[in-house]
Image (tube, rainbow, N blue to C red):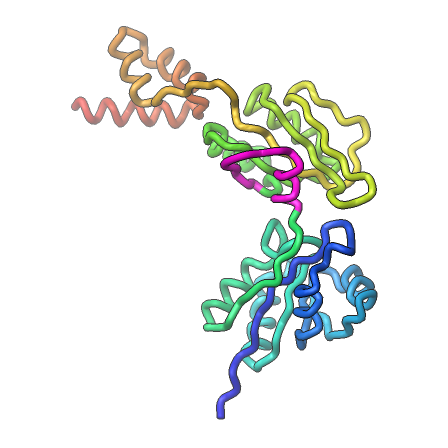
Amino acid sequence: MEKSSGILTLVGTPIGNAADLTPRALQALEDADVIACEDTRRSLPFLLGRGVKKPLVSYHKHNEKSGAEYLVNLLLQGKNVALITDAGMPGISDPGAVVVRLARGAGITVTSAPGPTALTTALALAGVEGAFTFLGFLPEKTKDKTALVNAFKSVPSALVLYVSPHDLQKQLSFLHSLLGARRVTLVREITKLFEQVQEGVLGEIQIEEPRGEYVVIVHAAEGEDIPDPKQLLRDLLQGGEDKKSAIKQVAARCKLPRDDVYKMALEMKDERA
């Protein structure tokens, strides 16, 4: 008789206060044959402190592909695998997505024992209502992070980012250069002793000594009426504005890269041809 495959369980672990581990998450860890974690040195004391003694497998961003293949092989052998990260829910700016996709592709059952995540907790603490856009950690290269933020800056929602303390002021300045003086909320040390929520405006807020990981929430622009860029461009050109000036005005008012507006102008020219 062919042995059935094991189950992959994504287990949310505390983001600060150890008491936030749910009874179901603890049960999932106890039921696992193997526990995959980012850093065995960090996870081992946490697990032993809760009486969980299981074989640990290192699974982190530097070995996601090979590690995922190894874990799926264990699952296909019938082993139940629990996946945890250093804190929070696997897959939310942490390793997890690769092994989930690979496991599902192999017909393996993937389930979860949900737990805390800095993303939604920070949004709740900041009093954000409605839509939000999660950007995670910004890319390291200026070109890449500029392209990412530009792609979402006109979306009518809050933008949420994870930022390390040593990058905080630099990233706030960068966001101000692209987004202007929007309201911003900084949340740090969530569920820990020095949990803090700070509010301000991009371009003005200054943090003297950033400490702890930050969730940065840039609130949606308020009171802006952003016109349809193509219609605005058409109106300006038909009104006698020269192309260069019209492109510049549309880019500024619609918060779009000039290259995108230039391409729009070329498309409109082709339509008239």
Magenta span of residues:
118-135
Residue at horizontal 56%, vertical 73%?
7
Q: Is residue 2 above or below residue 20?
A: below
Q: Residue furthest left?
A: 273
Q: Is residue 69 above or below residue 84?
A: below
Q: Would you identify the image quadrant in which residue 198 lies?
A: top right
134 within the magenta span: yes
Residue at horizontal 76%, vertical 35%?
196
Does the image show residue 150?
Answer: yes
65 within the magenta span: no
Q: Would you identify the image quadrant in which residue 139 lies?
A: top right
Does the image show residue 61?
Answer: no
Whole-percent x, y for residue 114 in the image: 62, 58
Q: Residue furthest front?
A: 23
Whole-percent x, y for residue 110 in the image: 53, 67
Q: Nearer the viewer, residue 12 or 214?
A: 12
Residue at horizontal 64%, vertical 22%?
202
Q: Residue furthest top?
A: 240
Whole-percent x, y for residue 212 in the image: 77, 40
Image quarter in which the C terminus is found: top left
Residue at horizontal 70%, vertical 36%?
187
Q: Would you identify the image quadrant in which residue 8 lies?
A: bottom right
Q: Is residue 182 left or right of residue 45?
A: left
Q: Is residue 246 left or right of residue 27?
A: left
